[in-house]
Image (spheres, rainbow, N blue to C red):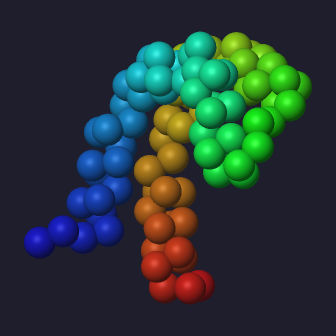
Amino acid sequence: MATLQSAQAKWERKTANAGAKWKAAVSGKGAEYSAGIQRFLGAAPSAMVVTAYEQGVGAVSAQDFQSAIAGKGAKWAENTRRGLTGG
């Protein structure tokens, strides 16, 4: 039976090497980001939005991302509990 503790352990396993996966998934995707905004709004975003996306992704390394989420399993579990129980 799944529990919050087992879900936390799974989250920790899945995010143990997430930095490189995240970086690969978001790098060079400014055009896709722009297309998604256009589908959502029905209008193209300004070029500044796409530039800001690319600069933001470029400013964060895979290692930066990994260190930002490392050791956060308990925080993830608490936020999940709060989100599902309303408090």
In which quadrant of the rendered view does residue 39 lie? top right
Question: Residue drawn at (29%, 39%), measured in percent from left and top?
Answer: 13
Q: Picture coordinates of residue 66 (x, y %)? A: 52, 26
Can you name the residue that lies furthest to the left here?
A: 1
Horizontal side of residue 30 vs 21, given as left or right: right
Q: Residue at x 44, y 50 (%)?
A: 73
Q: Is residue 10 visible?
A: yes
In the rendered image of this protein, does residue 78 appear above or below residue 69? below
Q: Quadrant of residue 46?
A: top right
Q: Nearer the viewer, residue 84 or 27?
A: 27
- Residue at 59% of width from left, 85% of height from top? 87
Based on the displayed image, in which of its 4 quarters is residue 6 positioned? Answer: bottom left
Percent x, y for residue 42? 71, 49
Q: Is residue 46 left or right of residue 77?
A: right
Answer yes or no: is residue 52 visible: no
Which image quarter is the N terminus in? bottom left
40 or 23: nearer the viewer: 40
Q: Nearer the viewer, residue 6 or 21?
A: 21
Compared to 18, does 54 lie above or below?
A: above
Question: Relative to residue 4, is residue 56 drawn left or right?
Answer: right
Residue drawn at point x = 76 percent, y = 43 percent: 43
**Where residue 33 sits: x, y (%)?**
63, 32
